[in-house]
Amino acid sequence: MKSFRIKVQEDKVQFFYELLTYLGFVEFEQVEDYHEPRIYPGGNFEIRSGVSSPDDKLKSKVSQKNDEGLDSIRKVLNQIEKQRNKNRK
């Protein structure tokens, strides 16, 4: 089963309740307002000292591979642009 959180306007609660009772595939319960904490992915950060770690070496390798990938994409785009210019002439 999947779960959903639904907010219903006060004047439509009775209608919504009756609607759900006639649906055989739905299980529901009415609850009062509740607070659901928000999770921010950037909230668990750590201030590191200037000492390098093995992770830093891995990050530099990944960054270098990304740079190489960008260079190859630029070369391909330049070749495409050259072909377009040839075809225009």
Image: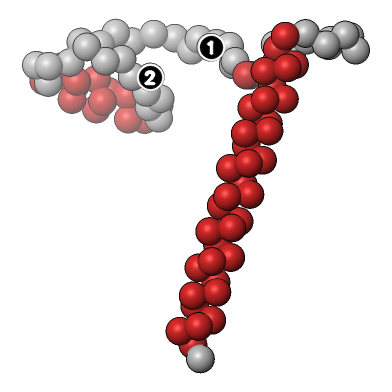
- Mark 2, Cα crowd under 10 Å, few <14 / some 14-19 / many 20+, is few
Which part of the image, by quadrant, shows the N terminus? top left
Which residue is under mark 1?
36
Mark 2 and mark 1: Cα distance apart in space: 11 Å
Badge 2 amino acid: Arg
Secondary structure beneath disc 1? loop
- Mark 1, Cα crowd under 10 Å, few <14 / some 14-19 / many 20+, is few
Q: Quadrant of residue 3?
A: top left
Badge 1 amino acid: Glu
Q: Quadrant of residue 5?
A: top left
Which residue is under mark 2?
5
Evaluate if marks 2 and 1 touch, with contact meaning CB atoms under 8 Å apart. Answer: yes
Q: Nearer the viewer, residue 87 or 48?
A: 87
Is 28 left, or right, of 87 in this rendering? left
Secondary structure beneath disc 2? loop
- Up-down: is 28 above or below 9? above
Q: Quadrant of residue 35?
A: top right
Q: Residue at x 24, y 27 (%)?
A: 15
